[in-house]
Amino acid sequence: MARPATLPALLEELRTYLDQKDAEWDQGGRVTATLPATADGKVNVRSLMREFRDWATDRGGSVPSSAWQYVYANKEWAHEINAVAVAQGLKAVGSRTPDDGADDAAQSRMARLGRDVKVQSEGHAQAKARIAHLERELSAKEAENQRLRERFALMRRTGVVMRVEDTGE
């Protein structure tokens, strides 16, 4: 952050820059905004401050690259920009539209659905692991059943009961 003594000087430079942008707006027939804007019609603060820094550098001044933060930290900076932005038909710095609430609701719903998908995919993986375990268990039981059938068939054919150590498990 710039030293407090330099902030008023930077604010004066910003006022001069904004006056020039406003004059360009008047000369251009008030058709196209001369301040940089986002796609939804808001003032693009970072682009504006980047242009301001370049403009000040061309005039021999020095503006820190973090100057965009002053717009949000100092209401006076935002007020100066908003005066020109509103005149050019742009939304003010930090403005939010009623649609933003709907956007927030949609984003929270998408986040909730994303979490639900994650939980479902984890449940799916656990179910697949359980199925694989049950298939192995079934295979072992079928093998044991087959061995017992063979022993029973031998006992029926010969009448001899054989003691065999079962190694099925």
Image (tube, helix red, strand yellow):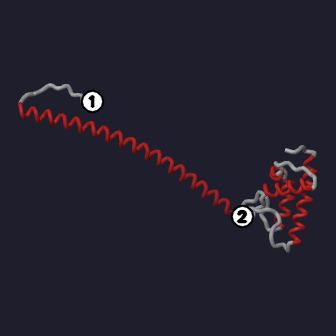
- Name the residue at 53% across, 53% down: 113
Element at label 2:
loop
The kind of residue tagged 1 is: Glu
Q: Is residue 121 above or below residue 143?
A: below
Q: Is residue 22 above or below residue 158?
A: below
Q: Position of residue 10 (x, y in %)?
A: 91, 52
Numbered label attached to residue 118? none
Q: Left of 112 or right of it: where is 46? A: right
Q: Position of residue 134 (x, y in %)?
A: 33, 40
Numbered label attached to residue 169? 1
The kind of residue tagged 2 is: Asp
- Name the residue at 36% across, 41% down: 132
How many labels were placed on the picture? 2
Q: Nearer the viewer, residue 38 or 4?
A: 38
Alpha carbon of mark 1 to alpha carbon of mark 2: how far? 70 Å
Q: Nearer the viewer, residue 40 or 103?
A: 40
Q: Hey, which quadrant is residue 94 in on the image? A: bottom right
Q: Nearer the viewer, residue 26 or 98?
A: 26
Q: Is residue 157 above or below residue 89?
A: above
Q: Quadrant of the N terminus?
A: top right
Q: Quadrant of the C terminus?
A: top left
Q: Position of residue 15 (x, y in %)?
A: 91, 58
Mark toward the start of the polypeptide (1 vs 2):
2
Q: Hey, which quadrant is residue 149 in on the image? A: top left
Identify the residue position indicated by label 2 in the image.
Answer: 40
Q: Left of 164 or right of it: where is 67? A: right
